[in-house]
Structures are given as structure tokens and as C-alpha cells.
Image (cartoon, rainbow, N blue to C red):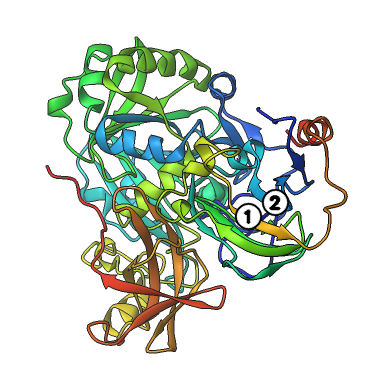
Amino acid sequence: MSVPTELGYTAKHEWVVVKDGIATVGITAFAAESLGDIVYVELPEAGTEVTAGQTCGEVESTKSVSDVYSPVSGEVVEVNGALEDAPETINTAPFEDGWLFRARLSEEPTGLLSAEEYTKLTEGEE
Amino acid sequence: MTEGEDGNATHVTTPILSGVPMSEPASVPRATALREIHEKAGATLVDFAGWLMPLRYGSETAEHRAVREAAGLFDLSHMGEIRLSGPQAAEALDHALVGHLSKVKVGRARYTMITDADGGVLDDLIVYRLGEHEYLVVANAANAPVVSAALAERAGGFDVEVSDESADYALIAIQGPRAVEILAPLTDADLDAIRYYAGYEHTVAGQPVLLARTGYTGEDGFEIFVRPAAEAPRVWEALMAAGADHGLVPAGLSARDTLRMEAGMPLYGQELTAELTPFDAGLGRVVKFDKDGDFVGRAALEKASRTARARRLIGLVGRGRRPLRGGQEVQRDGVTVGTITSGAPSPTLGRPIAMAYVDGDLDTATGAFTVDVRGRGEAVDVVELPFYQRQS
């Protein structure tokens, strides 16, 4: 299972990468594989505030409904609109085209896991 | 991100499989004879009714499509097989079940039900008549012990032996438009001569089996009862090899559930429960009053057949993309009129589908229908069941 080293992770299977104060957020390949075929995503709208550790959306697969927790605090500046018609992109490219939203950070994210730490965590869950 | 429960506000951490009572999982689920094959194929295995069963091997949507367009292979070894043999096997079943099993010809099968004295459905069944004095009753995994005990009790006054042979059998289903061409080279049977809902003793890959043209997917296909179960891996591998060039893929319970939903087929625990009669479920046709003698549930069912139905099963198709799920409330012009029993994204329709019980006298031709999905009204259309019917 791929876990890119340049990203930060949460124990709830989100990933985040920060560039110029903007965080891009998605769910990991491990999460996507565990859920099965993703058929629907509910994302925060641009302009809304998200808070680290709080739910900010939903991902639904054939057989499950899951909350998405924001790994960061800030204002949503962009959502991945392509997921509306092609939610399966989260299965095929979770770390690339399957990103969920971008937020302008209101504070530096804390408590993120490294790729190594996240990998250890998922090995415990397999 | 945490995984949540289908439809309800409370969240749990297991994937949702409809049809299983929400009880504590069995301490150690039983494995079928095909477990190692599933593991090698990379299956996600889940505890389903006390059995460790393949949920999916890869993409469940791809498995679903393969069954509609080519063929899929299912391990259904969790199903219960109960044999009735003896001079009065037919009479015993006429008494124990709502169907007219003595009228079924040898080699044919019937979809039927077993109810309690109040007419509440204990399980839906397929009964195969193997001989003049021999039947095989196939029950849902979760209900097999109840069905087996009820049959033994109800057969009490008859000259018949009831034996629960669930542990002896493995059950493999091959379903889809290419099932015939895949199976034909492996069997001594003339498949064209086996009609829908017929089953006979034949061989598959040299193994004696009960080969039946039945299924739960809305496609043509066969169910292969293998005894002893230990021979099942060989039969499975032979079918997979024969199907390699025909698009055959192994398919899990997730695909099985979406396939049966599209076909409008009820699932015990969802559309059928002990609180509902066959008439409530719109399946009153399985109740045969024109048979000799009394049968368990007759008086209650005669009454149910004469009274207006309290509820009615309808089909819903979502206008948006958000999946509909069991337990969600159905509303007409903002007023709650029913509850979804099963719902899923339909790969064939490309839309969310659901079955729901609504008030029996509800006017579904007018009004704006919505489903309450965690506080938001999702617009739906009421449609006739099934959602999908194969072109035959």
C-alpha cells in the first residue's frame, strides 16, 4: 500500500500537504481500499471554516458511510468538484486527483503523523 | 475519517451488510471450504451470520458488472441445507411450509416460505424435490438453525426424517449470461434441458453435485451443491479455469446484495421479518391455500389475505448521487410515510436505488417524495419493482 513520504497523516486516515499556507487534504489509499468503491462524497463548501479534528464531510462507498475529519484548521478555498461526477477517482488516485479540498491555514497543523508512523498504524489495523 | 453505519446517526466501525441481525458477532466465525482460495485471491473477508465470507475481491462494482455482462462465481457455503426423506416427506412439507410442495415434480424447485402460527415469516426458502420421497430445503445462513428446528418439530407426526446437512455441503453459484458456456464443458448435464428452477444430480469437474438453475442475481445461472464440502475447492478452480476466457470473476457478498436489490428480490432481515406476513411483502402468491390439510400459519394467513395490507413494498430511485440506505425514512410532501429496507448505489442504473415499506393505501402517483438522509431530503422517484430485468 503506497504511503507517500512527503505527506502528513492522521490516525483517521486523512492526508495533508501544505504549500504556501494552503493545505490540500485527502484520504489515504489504505482508507480507500478499506472502504471499497467510493460512490459519493460530501465536501465542505468554499468559504466555510474547518477545524482540526472536526468532521467536515462524508465519503460513501457501496457498503459504508464515513465521516471525514479535517486534519487542519482554516478556511476552505477550493473543493475538488471533479469528485461529484467521478468519486471513484478517490479509489484510483487517492493521493493525486482524488484530493478532497484545499484550506488556507489559520494555524499550523499539529500532531500529524509521518508516513512511517502512519504505515505502522495501518499495519496494526490490517 | 471513521467508518459509519448505514443510514443511522450512530456510528459503528464495521462495513454494512444487510440481512444480518445486529447482534454480537460470533466469537470465531466459521470458515467455508473455500477460505484459502478467497485469501489467495485477495478477498476482504467479513463475519456474515457467523461465517467468514468474501465481501469483495477487488472492486465490488466491477464484480457486479461482470455478473450482468459475463459471469461471476460466488461462495454461498454459509447457506443452510436441510434434507427431508421418507414416505411422508411431501405431506410434512405441505404442513410445515406455506407452499404446495407435494405438487412439485421431481427435479424441480420452488421459492417458498416458512411462517410462524401468526403468519410471520421465519425465512424464505428454496425447496428442491430430489426424489419422490426426498427434498432439500435451502435456508438463509442466519436462520438455518431455526428452520431446521421448526421442520423437525413440524414433521413430528409424519413418517419422515429431517436432517440438517448444512455442514456437509459447500454451495457455489455461477451467475451471468455466460454461465452456460463456461459450465457446459465441465458437466455431464445437458444444460439446455435444465429449466429455470430445476435441479438434478449431475457431475461438475467429475464431482457428483446437485446442479440447479437457480440464483439470486436476476441473471441466468446455476447453483452447485457440493458434498462433501471438501471437494469444493477443486470444483471452484475448475470453474475459474474454464471461465478465464469468458470474463468470469469471483464475486463477493457486496455484489450479491446489489445484484439482488436491482432484481427486486427480498432479503430476510430487510424486506422479510417475523413481524411481516408474505402478503405484507407483496409475496402472497407463495401462500397456497388450495392444498390438503392444515398448515402452520393457515388461519392467520387466510385472514391476512382478506384484509387490506398495512404496508406495501415500493421501489425508489434517487435523483441525485447520494446513496439511499436501509433505515432511512421516506417522506411524501414532507410527511413520513415509510422506511427504506434496503438501499445501495445501483451500478446498472448509475443511481441510488432502494426498496421501502410505505403505508398500504398511500397514493404514490402524486406528491413529492424524498428520503431523509441524515437530515437532508434527497429527492426520489417511486418506481415499479424490479429495477432491472434481464432480456431473455
The reply to whether discs 2 and 1 touch (Cβ–Cβ < 8 Å) is yes
Q: In this view, does B87 lie to the left or right of B338?
A: left
Q: Which amino acid does label 1 sit on?
A: Arg
Q: Which residue position is annotated with label 2?
A: A23
Query: Can the viewer see residue B85 in this picture?
Result: no
**Residue located 38% across and 17% down the image:** B240
Q: Which chain carries label 1?
A: A
Give residue A42's mark: none
Give residue A102's mark: 1
Taking depth in this image into account, of B271 and B111 the one nearest to the observer is B271
Q: Position of residue B193 (x, y in %)?
A: 13, 27
The image shows residue B235, relative to residue B68, as above or below, that is above
At mark 1, the secondary structure is strand
At mark 2, the secondary structure is strand
Residue at the limit of the structure toward the right, as seen here: A111
Q: In which quarter of the image is residue A114?
A: top right
How many other residues sit within 10 Å of disc 2, few (<14), some (14-19) or many (≥20)? many
The image shows residue A100, relative to residue B60, as above or below, that is below
Residue at the limit of the structure toward the top, as seen here: B206
Q: Looking at the image, is mark 2 or mark 1 earlier in the sequence? A: 2
Discs 2 and 1 share one subunit = yes
How many other residues sit within 10 Å of disc 1, few (<14), some (14-19) or many (≥20)? many
Q: Which chain carries label 2?
A: A
Query: Can the viewer see residue B388 in this picture?
Result: yes
Q: What residue type is labelled 2?
A: Ala
**Residue located 53% across and 51% down the image:** A63
Quadrant housing the C terminus of chain B:
top left
Residue at the limit of the structure toward the front, as seen here: A20
